[in-house]
Each structure stands twice: as C-alpha cells, then as structure tokens.
C-alpha cells in the first residue's frame, strides 16, 4: 500500500504535507502561531501528525509518543520586549518627602512579564529586586512600588527600571530624574522693621530669598506675587489700609512646596499730635529768672 496523505495539526490548524522526492520526507513550510507558546500548557504548542494510506489505515502521533513526542513540542518565542512606564515621581519633580514611594508599570501582552526580572536602581546603588519590590499582578503585567528604607539626601536623584518577559526579551531601561528638598527656602526682610511707625499710607517691603536645591523661589506679600530678581532680592510697595497696626505677611515658597513665612507689623499714623494746652509759670517772670513751661499734647 502507498501513503495517501500526511497531515500536521498545529494550534487548531490542519496542514497537508507534501512528499519531497529528493529527501523522501513529507514536508511543509508552516507559519508559526502569532503568539508565544509560553502560556500554553507545558509552554509549547503540540503538533499532531496524521498519516493515511490508500486502504484508509490511519496512524496518529502526538506529544505523548515515547519516541517522537519531544520533537512534536513546538516552542514559539515572541520578539517584543515588555514596556516600562514610571508613574511616580514624575520627571523633574521636586519632592519634600525624602522617602518617596516609587511607582512603575511593566506590561507585556504575550508571553508575560517575568516578575523575577523586575528591578530598580536608585542613583549608583545596587539593583533592588525580589520581595523588596511590591508587585501586583494586573491584566498584561504588573504594577510595582518601592519605598526607600533610608532617606534620600537633598538634591538630584535618578531611578532606573529593568524587566524581561518569559521569552527572555529585555525591556529598554527606563529612567527618570527628580529632586528631594526637605529644607524650606531662606527668607530675610531688610525693611521695614517689625513695629515700624509711619505717617505714609504705603510702605516699601524689601528682602531676599534663596533655595539651593529648588530655585527659583516664589514670593508673595499679602497674597500678591512679587517679582524676584536673579540674585534673590525683591521689593514691593504695600498699601497700609487702616489707621493703626497693619499686618504684612511675606511667604517664600520653593518648588517642593516648602514655605518660610515672616510677618511684619507696621503702624500707620497719619494724624498729627494736638496741642491742647500751654502754661508758663510764673508769668510774668523776672529777667534772668527761670520759669516752667507746661504743654498738654495728645496723639
């Protein structure tokens, strides 16, 4: 009897194999499945072979065959690497918390993210891996978070994230840079002095500010933004709205949200004093003699 047909069944698709007269084998060029075999049972696609002769006799061989079973386990690997996105902190952010929670996502739509490959590096430190990173499985990957056990110093820091999928494709390393600033900005007021008294209805408030880590600093005087020069100095005329004590509040705020506040009390007194009485005793007075001048003044 002669072989009538040879077929291969792969991933639900039936393919007819043709006899290659030069090799004596039945062959076919087959397009591999479009997705990785990693998530298949056993991490492979099983191939089933079916041979039929002219008499209708059929022989079927699959992965359970003791001799050919291993050869019929088709391993398909994807070539697309996982994608990493850092969600916190954002690029160039300035933070006042020196132990910020770092958050990122690792996604892979095919073979899947291998959680054992997820790592984080802070500055030039050692890679952080394993259970130190909190990994929560989501559809298509993991959301990850890590809180430094030691406080980060004020200044600039860079974090780097790495990961691979189950087929060994390494994601492009993703990094972001941010600043830590735990120190409020410096603020000094050169004028007016606290408790200053004036008969003018405006007062010039002058001072200087600086923040080494997160300049420029924003300055407000009684809620109004003031222009700060490149050297940190500022000056603004402020109206004194009531007769008596006027409170002037100056606030310096850096990019991390840290604030320094100084309050000055300025007394506005536009009313001249009143002379309500005067008496010279004795009056008249002898030449060359002394007398007492008594004056009553109110203000």
Image (cartoon, rainbow, N blue to C red):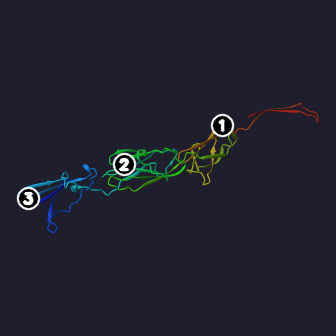
Q: Taking 246 as reference, is 127 left or right?
A: left
Q: CA distance from mark 2 to mark 3?
A: 50 Å
Where residue 61 appears, x then y in whole percent? 16, 54
Residue at the extreme front of the image, as rendered? 67
- The residue identified by callout 1 is 245
First reached walking from the N terminus: tag 2 or tag 3 = 3
Where residue 107 appears, x then y in whole percent? 35, 50
- The residue identified by callout 2 is 115
- The residue identified by callout 3 is 53
Q: Residue at x 9, y 61 (%)?
A: 3
> Few, some or many C-alpha atoms within 10 Å of disc 1 (few <14, some 14-19, many ≥20)?
some
Residue 241 vertical position relative to residue 31 in the rendered view, above or below: above
User: Regarding mark 1 in the picture, which secondary structure is present there?
Assistant: strand
> Few, some or many C-alpha atoms within 10 Å of disc 3 (few <14, some 14-19, many ≥20)?
some
Q: CA distance from mark 3 to mark 1?
A: 111 Å
Where residue 261 appears, x then y in whole percent? 60, 42
């Amino acid at each position: 009897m002669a072989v009538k047909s040879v077929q291969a069944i792969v991933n639900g698709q039936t393919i007819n194999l043709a006899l290659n007269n030069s090799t004596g084998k039945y062959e076919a060029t087959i397009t591999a499945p479009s997705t990785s075999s990693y998530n298949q049972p056993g991490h492979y696609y099983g191939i089933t072979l079916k041979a039929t002769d002219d008499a209708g006799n059929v022989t079927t061989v699959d992965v359970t065959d003791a001799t050919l079973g291993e050869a019929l386990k088709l391993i398909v690997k994807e070539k697309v690497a996982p994608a990493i996105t850092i969600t916190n902190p954002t690029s160039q952010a300035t933070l006042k918390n020196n132990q910020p929670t770092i958050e990122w996502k690792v996604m892979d739509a095919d073979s899947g993210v291998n959680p054992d490959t997820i790592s984080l590096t802070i500055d030039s430190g050692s890679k952080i891996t394993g259970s130190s990173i909190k990994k929560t499985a989501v559809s298509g990957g993991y959301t990850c978070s890590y809180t430094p056990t030691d406080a980060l110093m004020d200044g600039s820091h860079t974090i780097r994230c790495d990961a691979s999928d189950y087929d060994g494709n390494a994601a492009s390393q993703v990094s972001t840079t941010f600043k830590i600033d735990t120190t409020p900005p410096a603020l000094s007021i050169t004028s007016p002095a606290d408790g200053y008294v004036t008969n003018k209805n405006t007062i010039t408030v002058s001072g200087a500010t600086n923040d080494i880590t997160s300049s420029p600093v924003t300055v407000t005087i009684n809620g109004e933004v003031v222009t700060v020069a490149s050297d940190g100095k500022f000056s603004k005329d402020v109206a004194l709205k009531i007769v008596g004590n006027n409170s002037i509040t100056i606030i310096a705020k850096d990019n991390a949200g840290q604030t320094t506040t100084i309050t000055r009390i300025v007394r506005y007194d536009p009313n001249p004093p009143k002379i309500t009485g005067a008496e010279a005793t004795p009056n008249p007075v002898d030449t060359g003699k002394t007398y007492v001048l008594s004056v009553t003044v109110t203000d």
